[in-house]
Image (cartoon, grey):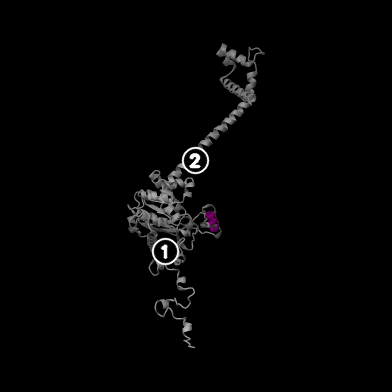
Amino acid sequence: MDYASVVAKLRRPADGCCKSTPCGASLASTRASSSTSFTSTYSFKDLALAIAVATRLRRDAQDKSSGAWALVEAVGHRLKLAAVAGLLVTLWMAWTKYMRRVARRQAKWGNGRVAMLAGAALFAGARRMGLTANNEVAEGAGHVQQMHGRQCLACWHPHGLYTIAPFLFHSQLPRNRDSVSYGYFTAVAGACFHLPVFREILGLINARVADSRIVDGLLTEGHSVFVCPGGIYEQLHTDPNQEQVFFPPNLGFVRQAIKHGVPLVPTYNFGENQLFDLPDWSRKLSLWLKERYNMGVPLGIGRHHLPFVPRKLHLSIRVGDFVEVGEAEEHPSDERVREVFLEYCRALRRLFEAHKDEDLPPEVAARGLILVWRGHDDVDLSLDALLGKRPALDPEPKMAARALILVWRGHDDVDLSLDALLGKRPALDPEPKMAARGLILV
């Protein structure tokens, strides 16, 4: 029976009822007098339908008579949604603030097994993208074993566009008890901790903000740290056709190592620069953003000419020799810092020269490695200078070939040339062209 027929049946008088009496009253009197007579008139199915119809009629009446109640219900529903949204936003802000503290924390964060799982997922993602690598840190090569149990300041080069090699192939090692780099921390750009999910992964794998105070605190606590001296500047100057490494003007990483008396360890990620192409317009845009907003967002073009999709390559993470810095000194002199720095550059050069032909494309390997100490163009960091064929502090070769000219203003008769000063001819002789004419007495 449908709604209309039930209403019609309920409104029709039953047998023995007065026509002027509503069927509701008849139904009530019948139920009060005898259940037998009630069931003879209406079935239980009719009763259920009657209850449903009465409920609906009452609800319809309330809706028609009280529109304000409907408005109150709608407002209440929206207030509930607003309260839930506000609670979620508050929780999100609190979690973000908490993760900012984690980014500066000088201790591990999170469960070790979860961190290992996150690192394994990154490694699997790299394989999925067609990336493979041999990592001397993970393999525990003979000369790398000294990293185990000894505090050091390890430096990776080059930065590349997105530091793919360290992030994908080294991330699970700092939480792996069987790794030589167990307990190591990695200094990364603070902007990385503004990205949800990504920041949680970084926190799990012992990544912290690349701030001098954070690195100093980690070293003070006895931890080993991975840093990238080139930073954002090196990232924005990434060139897939030329291997180059940039060092900061104040050499903060060398000063930190000397302050705490820990050795420097050079590492090189061969193939990092070749994962992406960097168009000229992207480089100019990145440099403009760096100058204007102090942030670099290089757009690398990789496989299938798509951004952020790396080429399928085999990478090699190589580790060089330890560079001892001597006794700890809180405020080392510039001369000592320079000496340690040049020794570090020699170790880095030896590492690059030993593996460039095997791990780089032939045309890139043939161009060699360019080392740049920003703000110190007078220091020659070429291969010949660092390996002893030419003093590192000599001027550039093209300038050295022109020799040095000394001039005593107002005394042109004094010869300050190399031959005169070293005794090959008198310094006070007149110019050669004048001497050749002889002496005239008048």
* Residue numbers of the magenta segment: 283-291
Marker disc for residue 79: none
Q: Amino acid at mark 2?
A: Met
Element on which disc 1 rests: helix
Q: Identify the main secondary structure in magenta.
A: helix
Against 65, residue 240 (above or below) is below
Report the number of discs. 2
Q: Mark 1 highlights which residue?
A: 356
Against 295, residue 81 (above or below) is above
| Residue 151 image offset from top left, x and y in percent | 34, 53
| Residue 36 image offset from top left, x and y in percent | 56, 13
Marker disc for residue 93: 2
Element on which disc 2 rests: helix
Quick one: 176 or 27, which is closer to the camera?
176
| Residue 200 image offset from top left, x and y in percent | 45, 45
64 is within the stretch colored magenta: no
Against 314, residue 68 (above or below) is above
Alpha-carbon span between mark 1 and mark 2: 47 Å
For the point 47% across and 60% down, the residue is 274
In which quadrant of the rendered view does residue 285 lie? bottom right
